[in-house]
Image (tube, helix red, strand yellow):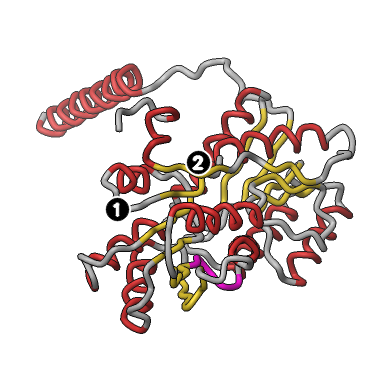
Amino acid sequence: MIIKTRTLFYTITIIFFLTSFIGMLFYGYKTFYIEPTNATSKSYTHHFALIAEETENDYWRLIEQGAKEAAAENDIFLEYVAPQKADNDQLLRLFDRMIAAKVDGIIVQGVEEERFVDLVHKATERDIPIITIDTDVKSSARKAYVGTDNFYAGELAGKTIIENTEGKQFVGIITGRFEAINQQERMAGFQSAIASEPRVQIVAKEESNITEIGATQATYALLKENPKVNALVGLSALDGVGMVEGLQEIAPNKEMYITAFDVLPETLNLIRKNEINATIEQYPHEMGFDSVEVLIDLQKQDLLENQIFTDTGVIEKQDLSKIHGESQ
């Protein structure tokens, strides 16, 4: 009798457990299961890669925005890759990786190294068109360059000092990286512009490593070693803000004519405050957009024009109201 009672008890217990378990599975399924849709993954006409100088750089993010807009309009998948910090070795490794991935086209900042030239040749052999952006390497087999005429941009920086100052101007140059081709071209353009103006002379050059804090430290060091400097020129996007901070640290009351580069919001704000006199305006969004358009054309045929220069200009305080809708 006791055995029968135990058997019945265990049977009921097992039935109860199984019922509860099945109920849990059923209601859990209803609660958490999401019915799959029949939507298939989006198909793209092409897969392009944009290889930037460094990941979280405001200037390169504007290039990315423009490129992604053009890509979206043309059903293209655009992959944005870059080193965390500016590093030519890492950039070239990313370049090689994108070639190995067999993308349909690559937009990349030019690097003046034999390895870069070899990688462009390697891509060309695999029918992957290469466009250089921001910095050109004319010795490579790249199909086209899209971006600023950097020599001309340097000339504009020189002209701002010639046209807006009087008397001797002892110029300190803050450049992003001495090895960068675009910085070298801007420097050459600046030197060309002031060559016939003996009152304007370069007395010192420092490197910022294309960071704001680097520009601050470079400016501090430059002015400490060369106190007679009364004009500063920055050749990369973050140099303007850094130059102002460096000046405030070492000589906050010193009169200084400052020419920056690019129209990042912080730079424009310092122009409003009369702490930067002028900046050389590039159009990174336009560069990104145009580079994708050029790559699309290259899927069909080669280009007749292999240098596509985007607009460049000088922005001073009086220009802000016209192009940014502000009162002075």
State the mark number for residue 159: none
Q: Residue at x 34, y 46 (%)?
A: 271
Q: Residue at x 51, y 73 (%)?
A: 202
Amino acid carrying mark 1 in the image: Glu
Horizontal relation, residue 172 to residue 198: left or right: left
Q: Of label 1 and label 2, which has the lower sequence position?
A: 2
Q: Nearer the viewer, residue 138 or 241?
A: 241
Q: Nearer the viewer, residue 98 or 325?
A: 325
Q: Residue at x 19, y 24 (%)?
A: 12
Image x and y of residue 142, in percent: 80, 53
Q: Quadrant of the C terminus?
A: top left
Instruction: Tell me: residue 247, above or below residue 61.
Output: below
Location of residue 158 (image quadrant): bottom right
Asked which secondary structure carries label 2, the reply is helix
Asked which secondary structure carries label 1, the reply is loop
Spatial separation of the CA atoms under disc 1 and disc 2: 24 Å
Q: Nearer the viewer, residue 96 or 294?
A: 294
Q: Which residue is mark 1?
A: 275
Image x and y of residue 234, in percent: 46, 61
State the mark number for residue 62: 2
Instruction: Tell me: residue 40, above or below residue 117.
Output: above
Q: Nearer the viewer, mark 1 or mark 2?
A: 1
Image x and y of residue 111, in percent: 68, 64
Horizontal relation, residue 324 to residue 49: left or right: left
**Category of crowding for the residue at label 2, using alpha-carbon neighbours closer than 10 angstroms: few (below 14), some (14–19), many (at least 20):** some
Location of residue 68 (image quadrant): top right
Amino acid carrying mark 2 in the image: Leu
Image x and y of residue 293, in percent: 71, 32
What is the span of residues highlighted in magenta in the rendered image?
175-179
Asked whether the viewer can see residue 3, the reply is: yes
